[in-house]
Image (cartoon, rainbow, N blue to C red):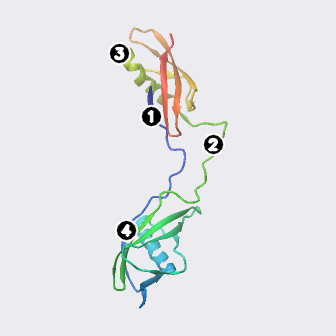
Amino acid sequence: MSSRPVAPLLGAALAGAALVLALVGCSASAEAGPTVSGSKLAATASKALAEKVGTTPEMDCGTDDIIIVKGKKVTCELTDTDGLIYDVAVTFTSVTGSTYHIDVKVADTAKNAPTPTVDPGSSPTVKGTDIAQLAAQALTPSLQFTPDISCADEDVPIAVGNTEECAFTDPSGSDHDVLVTITKFDGSNYSIDAKVTD
C-alpha cells in the first residue's frame, strides 16, 4: 500500500506576523500606571503588521484604556478584506516610563471561517499519471522491476473503494492488467492498493 498527499482543497489562512515596535506618548494614571487607549493600540498594532504584510489591516482593540504592564497580553481583532476576523495577540514586551514595545501575532485561523462543504456527488481528483506512478512504486518490490504503468482515466476521483484500471508491459513483452483501489482518504492524503489481475 502506498500513499501521498492530495493538493490542498481550501484556500490558505492569513499567516501570523510578529514584530516589535517602540512607541512614545501614553497617558499616565497615578493609581494604575501608564495607559493607552484601545483605538491607539489598534492603530499601532495595525501599523506594525502593515510593515510586515504590505497592507494596513483593520484592527479593533476595543474602546477602553489599557494599562501598560510588561508581559500583559491584549486580544484584538483583525478583519481582512474578505471579512474574516482573526484574533490578534498584542503583548507588551517592555515598558520604560511612557515608552513601550509590543509583539503582535495573528492567529492562523479566522474565528468566523466558513465550514467547508463538499458536494455529496463530487470528490477530489488526482491525475491518472499520479495513480500510475504510485501503483508502480507499490508493485516494484513484488515484480522485481519498476513497471511503466498507464491508467485508463486522465483524472481519478479519490474516494475510498473507488477503483482504476491500469496496465503495463513487462520486459518480456507480455501485457498485464492492474486494478488500483483507493483504500484510504482523510481529506488530504490517500492510500492505494495495486494488484496485477492477470
Badge 4 is on which residue? Answer: 19
Q: Circle 3 — which element?
A: loop
Reading the chain from its start, which is encountered first: label 1 or label 4?
1
Amino acid at circle 2: Val
- Residue 17 placement, left or right of 179: left
Amino acid at circle 1: Arg
Badge 4 density bin: few <14, some 14–19, many ≥20, Cα 10 Å: some
Q: Residue at x 49, y 38 (%)?
A: 6
Nearest to the observer: residue 106 or residue 125:
106
* Residue 169 sits in quarter: top left
Locate the N terminus by quadrant: top left
Tag shown at residue 144 = 3
Badge 2 is on which residue? Answer: 118
Q: Circle 4 — which element?
A: loop
Q: Where is residue 21 in the image (x, y as percent from the top left)?
A: 37, 74
Nearest to the observer: residue 166 or residue 154:
166
Badge 1 is on which residue? Answer: 4
Q: Circle 2 — which element?
A: loop
Reading the chain from its start, which is encountered first: label 1 or label 3?
1
Judged by depth in the image, the label closer to the viewer, 2 or 3, is 2
Reading the chain from its start, which is encountered first: label 2 or label 4?
4
Tag shown at residue 57 = none
- Are circles 1 and 2 on residues that touch, CB within 8 Å? no
Amino acid at circle 3: Gln
- Are circles 4 and 3 on residues that touch, CB within 8 Å? no
* Residue 153 sits in quarter: top right
The image shows residue 101, relative to residue 152, as above or below, that is below
Reading the chain from its start, which is encountered first: label 4 or label 3?
4
Q: Which residue is drawn at 53% across and 51% down?
A: 11
Report the Cα–Cα distance between label 1 and label 2: 21 Å
Q: Circle 1 — which element?
A: strand
